[in-house]
Amino acid sequence: MIITLVGFMAAGKTSVGKLLAKKLDYKFIDLDQYIERLTQNSIRKIFSAKGEKQFRRLEKKLLKKLIEKHEDLIISPGGGIVIDQDNIDLIKEKTMPFYLKASPDTIVNRLGEISDRPLIDQNNPKKAVDELLKKREYLYNQFNNIIRTDNMNLEEVTDEIFYKLDKLN
């Protein structure tokens, strides 16, 4: 089984994915980190050199490749994976998706270095998060397995995924 953790940046996808992979004895891939390793460039550099459109093409291609190539895998794609409906359809059809949902306040509080986040690296990151989240919310809401991560720690989110997986099987 392939499990995909979708959601906005800083929703907990990578941290939860690592813990979940360890507990399930699955392989874990953070798609953005995978892209950075393959291209030997940061996401920021790819955005500035080639643009978001080129990055999204590469992201889509590699998501498809990972899904076709692996079993027993947890994928943590970047928050923008949902911009392309084909990605949403692929994730829903070929993987077990979980939407890790966090409020704008939680996201801003969890964000590390915003210079690593090209879409919100501006004077008012809270406003950028609010605007981007509003644009994407209907896309994220296409996933049925929703876990609100605002007041949960990593263990609690992981336990909730286990609970939902058990109910679905």
Image (cartoon, rainbow, N blue to C red):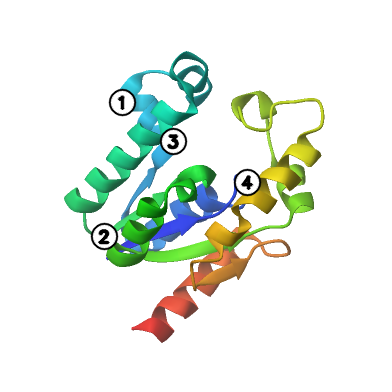
Can you identify the residue that label 3 sits on?
32
Q: Is residue 106 left or right of residue 96?
A: right
Q: Residues within 10 Å of mark 2 (few under 14, many from 20)?
A: few
Can you identify the residue that label 1 sits on?
38
Q: Indicate the position of residue 28 as horizontal and vertical percent values.
A: 36, 49
Q: Amino acid at mark 1?
A: Leu
Q: Earlier in the sequence, mark 1 or mark 4?
A: 4
Q: CA distance from mark 4 to mark 2?
A: 24 Å
**Can residue 78 be spotted in the picture?**
no
Q: Is residue 30 left or right of residue 120?
A: left
Can you identify the residue that label 4 sits on?
10
Q: Describe the element under mark 1 as helix, strand or loop.
A: helix
Which residue is at 53% across, 22% downward? 44
Q: Describe the element under mark 2 as helix, strand or loop.
A: loop
Q: Are marks 2 and 3 in contact (CB under 8 Å)?
A: no
Q: Residues within 10 Å of mark 3 (few under 14, many from 20)?
A: some
Q: Describe the element under mark 3 as helix, strand or loop.
A: helix
Q: CA distance from mark 2 to mark 3?
A: 19 Å
Q: Earlier in the sequence, mark 1 or mark 3?
A: 3
Q: CA distance from mark 1 to mark 4?
A: 23 Å
Q: Earlier in the sequence, mark 1 or mark 2?
A: 1
Q: Earlier in the sequence, mark 2 or mark 3?
A: 3
Q: Residues within 10 Å of mark 4 (few under 14, many from 20)?
A: many
- Circle 1 or circle 2, nearest the eye: 1
Q: CA distance from mark 1 to mark 3?
A: 10 Å
- Circle 2 or circle 3, nearest the eye: 3
Residue placed most toward the observer, 155 or 100: 100
Residue 72's disc is 2
Q: Quadrant of residue 147?
A: bottom right
**Can residue 147 be spotted in the picture?**
yes
